[in-house]
Amino acid sequence: MLAQGGPWALSVISLVLLLWQEVSAIDVPLDSKIQQDLKQPPTIMKQSLKDYIVDPRDNIIIECEAKGNPVPTFSWRRNGKFFNVGKDPRVTMRKRSGTLEISFRSGGRPEDYEGEYQCFASNDFGTALTSKILLRVSKSPLWPKEVLEPVVVSEGSPLVLACNPPPGLPPPLTFWMDSAMMPITQDKRVSMGLNGDLYFSNVLAKDSHTDYSCNARFLFTHTIQQKNPFTLKVQTSRKVAVTTPNFLSPTGTDSSRMVMRGEKLNLECIASGVPTPSIKWFKKGGDLNQKVKLDNFNKTLRIDSVSEEDAGEYMCMANNQIGSIRHSIYVQVKAAPYWLDQPSNLVLAPDENGRLVCRANGNPKPHIQWLVNGEPIESDSSLPNPSRSVVGDTIMFRSVQIGSSAVYQCNASNDHGYLLANAFVSILDMAPRMLGPKNQLIKVIENNRTFLDCPYFGSPLPELRWFKNGQGSGLDGGHYRVYINGTLEIKRARAEDQGTYTCVASNILGKEENQVRLEVKEPTRIVRAPEHQSAIRGTMARFDCRVKSDLTLPITVTWLKDDKPLSLGSRLKKDEDSLSIPNVHEGDEGTYTCTVRTEIDQDTASARLTVLDRPDAPMDLELSDPEARNVRLTWIHGDDHNSPVTLFVVQFEEDRWQSGKWQNLSSYPGDFNSVILELSPFVNYQFRVIAVNSVGQSRPSLPSQRYQTSGAPPDVIPSGLKGWGTKKNNMEISWEPLLDTERNGPNLNYSVWWRRKDTGEEWSNVTTVGTKHIVHDTETYVPYEIKLQAVNDFGLGRESNIIIGYSGEDKPTAPPTDLRVSKIDSTKVNVHWTPVDPSTVLGEFKEYRVYYWREGSMVKGLRVNKEKRTKGFYSTVAQPTGILTDLQPYSHYRIYMVVANNRYEGPPSNHVEFRTKEGVPEAPKFFKIIQRSTDVIHLEWDKPLEPNGILIGYKLRYQTVNGSRVGLMQMESFLPNVTTYTLRLPERGIRYKFYLAALTQVGAGEVYAEESPHFTNEAYSKDQVDIATQGWFIGLMCAIALIILILLIVCFIKRSRGGKYPVREKKDLPLDAVDQKGEDGSFDYHSDEDNKPLQGSQNSLDGGVKESDDSLVDYGEGGDGQFNEDGSFIGQYTVKKDKDETEGNESSEATSPVNAIYSLA
């Protein structure tokens, strides 16, 4: 049609399409209510194949299914004429369907119904039709009876056994078999062609058979027809002549093939010749593409689905040792019509525009014909339609009106076939309808992109608007976007976006609305995710999974292991924030995933658990490459259980000296599996290997076979050789014994040699099995040369180096003289003396040793510890001197000196006395801060235990503190007899830090620092009355104390009757522990001796004395300090107790019942 108009028609079509303004067709939703009410022309849903071959043994069914509203009615045409279904008793039409069923139960021939059928489906809005269906009955004719003469050929000649199967519908499949129903063997020489003939490139003597039979298989009837067998006789000759190749199929130098697009292409080249030719394929102008497959021993070229680019010249070449031959096949590709743009159904509203497009291609190019309701559109006089125009392959519709609905058919045809497509045009008017659920509740996550759906339909297409909370103008733009399908997008949902949203759809036929309620929730997040971890077998593994979510959304926490649900039994424990896996083993290894779900979102996090364990024992120990002193040991690594082996320990056991005892021989890096072991002679070894990783060591491997080394003289020199006197007239020579593996042979002995040094005397010698020898009747402390040698049955070992030993020492005979001191300080003094003659030391000089002790303190009444202390000075100069340090200031000391060798001290020197100078005192004995109210601080302290001089007073410095900030430092000074101070606070809640030090003439001593307590939690106020200052409270407390005192006195008197060991007789010390002060304000240390702390005790933070390790428990038979029935202590005080008793107020007297009475009095 277009070909007749030429270029002018194409220009008109382009201009019309350019100027055409089209409204998009309406997409009818699949909503059941709309589909129920929607009036629609017919649509073909199912039909039989165009080329329809049926089995004559079955009923014939020709399918035709269609839908539409109203339900379509069906009619048929056969061979272009109306087919009256009702008049033929064998033909029935299924209900609500156009499918025909032709039954032959009561007789009739299927061949009588062969022909071309076409189905028409019609309702009030149009007619749809199927493609023309060519019905043919399958045929499987018998092979014509024929008598086949034997085929006689000479050996080496080519041969073709013709098959010529009977023509069937569809054509049969052919194959060759023998009388035993076994396939004829095919190869490069013998093969079946595409036409079913059996080709022999050259015949051999072994081809002589009487049962070459061609078989035809008919697919529809499932039958196999067999041709009479060929008898082949081969005339043999002594020598088969070689021949050049010649084509058996196809013949000549060239041929041609036409194939349809999409069909299978098979090209064949079969050649004869001796030797058998080989076949190669080429394509002119290029290589064979990937679609090309070579079958039948390269004799067949196959392309399963041909396209236009497969056209061209294909060449096959047959060649053997004699020559070659070529054949060209020219392939043409034609195409039946195929769709480029198939027309689709069009639903329009009144006054809308639209178009149907039908575009197809083929070779030759197909002709496009339009039909309406099954009739050519040019002859459609029954439906004059001024709004419709046909332009080539397009039908244009403009301002369509109700009543112009119809079904249009596009027929595209060429010489090789045709295509037929139905597409209806339906003119629809419908008031708006809401398709979604009413009043839907949508929950979304904050900051997420959110869509509120409002599916609707109407014709003409309604206008849709959204409103929030029933107020304001429509929502579109900015934070919102409305899509053409009615969906409202909120780009990032926020808390303020919560509310009720209303969508309103309206057209000229009415309006409809729906509401959606939106709730914005906080996101569900895993804030502490599980982390990858490695756990040692038997320990506990724990994976965290802490979640933060919206409080209004219930959450579900599940755990997966390797993407499978985790079974939580008695061992695995899941709590709110974690998963615990106690006593982990290898089966627990894997990836654990924590999944937290709500109804609208979820979060997941994964971590891998790696279980570590000791490695498996090494395996398959093997000894190789034996030598006299070494052997190669090889093993196979065991499983390292996720912790790489870092070390291999090789152990050995020998059965001669310590049978059954395994000892370490050597160790090697973890990547070794073969080592050379250095061995000792005369040892019967067996070995085992232990693997070590970060978890621990494996079980030992199984032992290797034994390996015996030969004997040799000792090659190790005994170590630790020394000579030293145990008495003044002997010398003991000793050494370390050789290890069992160092013996190198039987009967190990030691040969020891000695002689006086520098005297020229001969060596003395003794051989012993022991590890020492004593030389008697020596002079005192003289040097000897000593050497040692090991020996066994195989010979002498190497001699040791000569060492110098000494005979025994004696007591030094002379004391140091002229001992004196100088430069006396408060804590140190210089010591001088005249050294002794070295010959009088009678041994190795070790040191000059000073003994010194504290005779007393120059402080009045202060008792001191007179324990002796020592300090050594090593000096060999003519005028030696030393410094004695760590002395106590202001004290009286006595010293003397001795000379010492390694075993003895000599006689003492002259005694020297000296007095150290006055120093600075120690810190006060205690320093207490007592704050009974928020406006006054009371300070108490006690004199130092070691004043180191005459106390002249105390210095108190203090400053306010507030966190890291401090105030101005203030200072107070006190006389030595003042031990209290009261400070009134300028403001409530102020805190102070105090620094207290005692003073002598030398200066201030060690500082005792304390900070006032914090009273922020105490309920003080100015108008609150202190109960402790009320008269009635004081009187009540006194009465209670008096009653308790009387009861205690009566109780203790009764319990002390008959007491055998009164404590009072054991310690006659003053009962009053009050400090006695002198008239000048100084302390009398004589009366305060009992206030000294026990030796080894420590001051506590509040200035008191911690309990000494020397408690009453030490003096009883039990650990609880119990009383006997008569009230006395179990056991008496010992001498140790009297000696160490230094407590006053806190001494054992306070625990004595009698002293307790006096104290209370």
Image: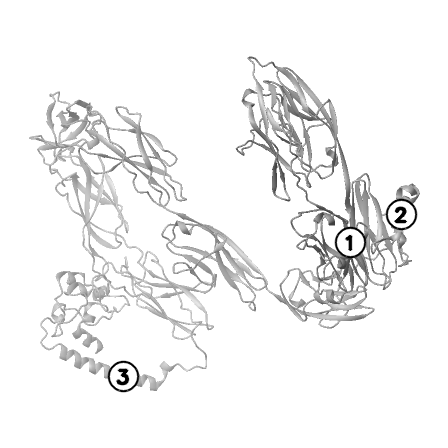
Element carrying mark 1: loop
Percent position of residue 756, x then y: 12, 25
Q: Earlier in the sequence, mark 3 or mark 2?
A: 2
Q: Is residue 1029 left or right of residue 92?
A: left
Mark number, residue 13: 2
Badge 3 vs badge 2, beta-carbon distance below 8 Å = no
Q: Earlier in the sequence, mark 1 or mark 2?
A: 2
Which numbered mark, 1 or 2, is in the foreground of this view? 1
Q: Quadrant of the N terminus?
A: top right
Crowding at dot 3, Cα within 10 Å, few <14 / some 14-19 / many 20+, comes out as: few
Badge 1 vs badge 3, beta-carbon distance below 8 Å = no
Query: Does residue 813 sit above or below 920 in this rendering?
Result: above
Q: Residue at x 39, y 81 (%)?
A: 1026
Q: Quadrant of the C terminus?
A: bottom left
Q: Is residue 841 left or right of residue 116?
A: left
Please tell me which residue lies in front, 956 or 832: 956
Mark number, residue 710: none
Q: Is residue 834 visible?
A: no
Please tell me which residue lies in front, 341 or 528: 341
Crowding at dot 2, Cα within 10 Å, few <14 / some 14-19 / many 20+, comes out as: some
Query: Does residue 185 sit above or below 548 in this rendering?
Result: above
Q: Which residue is mark 3?
A: 1040
Which numbered mark, 3 or 2, is in the foreground of this view? 2
Q: Residue 949 appears in which quarter of the rendering?
A: bottom left
Mark 3: amino acid: Ile
Crowding at dot 1, Cα within 10 Å, few <14 / some 14-19 / many 20+, comes out as: some
Element carrying mark 3: helix
How far apart marks 1 and 3 lie (CA) works out to 112 Å
Element carrying mark 2: helix
Mark 2: amino acid: Ile
Q: Residue 1051 appears in which quarter of the rendering?
A: bottom left
Percent position of residue 208, x then y: 55, 23
